[in-house]
Amino acid sequence: MESEIRKRSGREKDKASIKLLEKLRGQLYSSNASNRRRAGFNLSWMQEDGLEVLRDALFGDFPTTTKNAAAYGLRKMHGRMKKMALDVFKQGLKHRDSSTREVCRNALSLLGQKIPAKSFSKEPAAGNLRIREILKKSRPREKISMR
């Protein structure tokens, strides 16, 4: 007897994967933290399609919680996609949005990567701090006479 299971054509696979991607994209933007992380993890297994969705979430105008879930998914990439995910994080360090930069910096540190020094720091570097003595010039010194 022949098997009753039939193979799907390429077109049906595409429709199914598009539907799954839309579902996972919706879960990635969810208000439930568990759903966001699970969606990020599931997208990490979807190769280029998952990478594209996670990159859009990381670089888009979304809350930090969504960006953290996207970074989680990018950190969980496997195989050849791991290098592409690292490239996404390095691009994120140069992004105009401060929350994206911070999320990428944290993700790289969790992966054990070296993080380049901040080039546009507002605070002075630790070596540039000096303690100066403030002189009181408004009041003349009293001379002590010995009697």
Image (cartoon, rainbow, N blue to C red):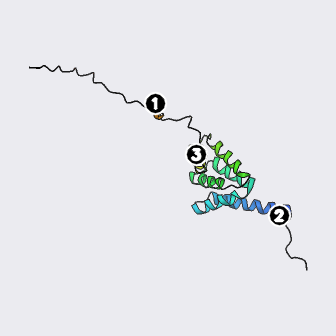
Q: Mark 1 points at which residue?
A: 128
Residue furthest left in the image: 147
Q: Name the residue under label 2.
A: 12
Query: Amino acid type of disc 1?
Result: Asn
Query: Amino acid type of disc 2?
Result: Glu
Q: Is residue 85 visible?
A: yes
Q: Name the residue under label 3.
A: 105
The mark found on residue 40 in the picture is none
Distance CA(mark 2)–CA(mark 1): 63 Å
Q: Nearer the viewer, residue 139 or 143?
A: 143
Q: In which quarter of the image is the C terminus?
A: top left
| Secondary structure of the residue carrying numbered label 3 | helix
Q: Which of 70 and 97 is in front in this view?
A: 70
Of pointers 2 and 1, the one earlier in the residue sequence = 2
Q: Nearer the viewer, mark 3 or mark 2?
A: 3
In the depicted structure, whether residue 64 falls above or below residue 17: above
The part of the image, by quadrant, that contains residue 72 is bottom right
Of pointers 3 and 2, the one earlier in the residue sequence = 2
Query: Amino acid type of disc 3?
Result: Arg
Q: Which residue is drawn at 37% across and 30% down?
A: 131
Q: Is residue 32 visible?
A: no
